Image: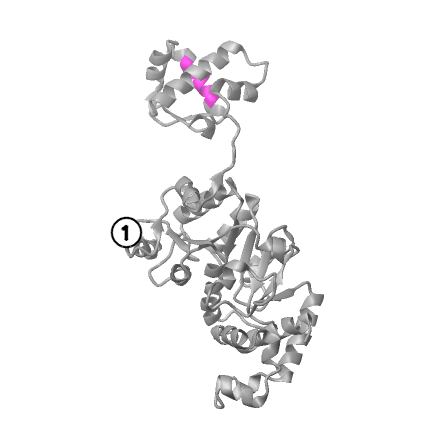
């Protein structure tokens, strides 16, 4: 048989043994190839599977032909299939004992490039809180500043998943969605546009091990979790209930001997109780610092240019027409607020040696331009991130 026959055989095995992936892997190990399985005679199949196996009659020429027709149709739609014994199969996933026989992939990227970056899986509750959303963005943004730049893996679901995908694309990171449907579908439907963008973005992809026509049944989401966990060198759980869907990929990642991290949360927040339990049971490391996360993952921060001084930033913002005396006094006020956050205008005037009226005037300019803020008590705080 040809290489094309091997691909078709792997596709057929995936369709037959989808929910019991260890069986085709064991058969391949015994016969040496997927195509070799379809060359076995009736007695040989009986010896391997047993004469009463429910799969015995499914390994047949018809299964091979149906897989061939399916792949031909998918190819015309821009969807390819990469099997377990083929060179382009993701190496991290291949290490897993329950890896699928193959993956359907929609992407403009070649298999070699698609799996070349270190991958980080990010999962969590669909009912993500503002706290979880903020930290999901922080995590992805910090990873975007690392080298090598990682790929973000998630499941295209509501809440944490789509938050991770969107933040990755906004940060310029590649991202891959592992779907719980056939390759021609997108679920939920509201994510069709982001899925379309991912399919044509460099380094991004939509992948699934489910054959065409597979509906988004609840059991399918459980099955796809092993792929999310298997593709990543580490799995991060942003938020999860104790019985939430994100608990499964974290347990799978732990069983694959991969790193697992969980974002701690309030003890009385139902969306954080799963993460807190993972940390307490030592399955996951607490994620309390994005800098520590990058170091733990073995990623290094990209070289940064020297930050601008207060004066350089103000000169750049206001331009050469701003009187130098104003810039000097702005720097004094900023320095006073940095040294004592919440300082009053009276105290700022005393610290800078300026009159109260002049202090209030310069502070008003800084506040109008978004560099500082004052509260009802006229206490001053730095706002612009460069000044913090």
- In which quadrant is the C terminus drawn? top left
In this picture, residue 135 sits left or right of residue 168: left
Specify whether residue 260 is in view.
Answer: yes
Residue 363 in the magenta stretch? The answer is yes
Residues in magenta? 359-366
Q: Residue furthest right?
A: 76
* Coordinates of residue 84 in the picture (x, y in percent): 56, 67
Specify whether residue 54 is in view.
Answer: no
Magenta-drawn stretch, dominant element (helix, strand or loop) = helix
Residue 211 in the magenta stretch? The answer is no
- In which quadrant is the N terminus drawn? bottom right
- Please tell me which residue is depicted at 41% across the width and 47% down the height of the picture: 130
- Please tell me which residue is depicted at 46% across the width and 71% down the height of the picture: 219
Q: Where 74 sits versus 276, above or below?
A: below
- Please tell me which residue is depicted at 55% across the width and 87% down the height of the picture: 44
* Coordinates of residue 164 in the picture (x, y in percent): 49, 51
Q: Label 1: how many residues lie within 10 Å, few (<14), some (14-19) or many (20+)?
A: few
**Quick one: 146 or 357, which is closer to the camera?**
146
Q: Where 352 sits versus 239, above or below?
A: above
The residue indicated by pointer 1 is: 267
Tell me the element at label 1.
Answer: loop
């Amino acid at each position: 048989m040809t290489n094309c026959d091997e691909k078709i055989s792997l596709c057929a095995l995936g369709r037959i043994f989808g929910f019991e992936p260890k069986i085709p892997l064991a058969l391949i190990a015994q016969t040496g190839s997927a195509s070799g399985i379809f060359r076995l005679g009736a007695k040989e199949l009986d010896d391997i599977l047993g004469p009463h196996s429910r799969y015995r009659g499914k390994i047949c020429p018809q299964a091979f032909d149906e897989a061939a027709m399916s792949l031909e149709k998918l190819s015309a739609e821009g969807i390819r299939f990469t099997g377990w014994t083929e060179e382009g199969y993701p190496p991290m996933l291949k290490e897993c004992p329950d890896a699928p026989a193959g993956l359907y992939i929609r992407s403009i990227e070649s298999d070699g490039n698609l799996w070349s970056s270190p991958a980080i899986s990010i999962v969590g509750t669909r009912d993500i809180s503002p706290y979880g959303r903020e930290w999901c963005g922080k995590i992805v943004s910090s990873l975007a500043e690392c080298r090598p730049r990682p790929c973000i893996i998630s499941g295209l679901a509501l809440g944490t998943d789509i938050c991770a995908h969107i933040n990755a694309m906004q940060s310029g990171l590649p991202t891959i969605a592992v779907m719980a449907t056939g390759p021609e579908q997108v679920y939920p439907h509201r994510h069709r546009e982001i899925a379309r963008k991912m399919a044509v973005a460099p380094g991004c992809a939509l992948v699934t091990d489910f054959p065409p026509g597979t509906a988004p049944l609840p059991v399918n989401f459980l099955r796809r979790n092993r792929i999310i966990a298997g593709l990543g060198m580490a799995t991060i759980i942003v938020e999860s209930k104790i019985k939430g869907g994100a608990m499964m990929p974290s347990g799978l990642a732990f069983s694959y001997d991969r790193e697992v991290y969980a974002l701690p949360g309030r003890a009385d927040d139902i969306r954080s109780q799963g993460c807190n339990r993972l940390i307490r049971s030592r399955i996951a490391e607490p994620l309390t610092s994005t800098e520590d996360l990058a170091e733990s993952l073995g990623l290094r921060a990209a070289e940064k240019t020297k930050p601008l001084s207060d004066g350089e930033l103000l000169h750049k913002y206001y331009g050469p027409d701003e009187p130098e005396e104003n810039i000097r006094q702005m720097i004094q006020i900023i320095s006073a607020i940095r040294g004592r956050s919440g300082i009053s205008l009276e105290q700022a005037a005393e610290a800078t040696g300026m009159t109260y009226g002049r202090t209030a005037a310069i502070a008003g300019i800084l506040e109008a331009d978004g560099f500082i803020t004052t509260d009802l008590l006229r206490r001053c705080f730095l706002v612009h991130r460069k000044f913090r």
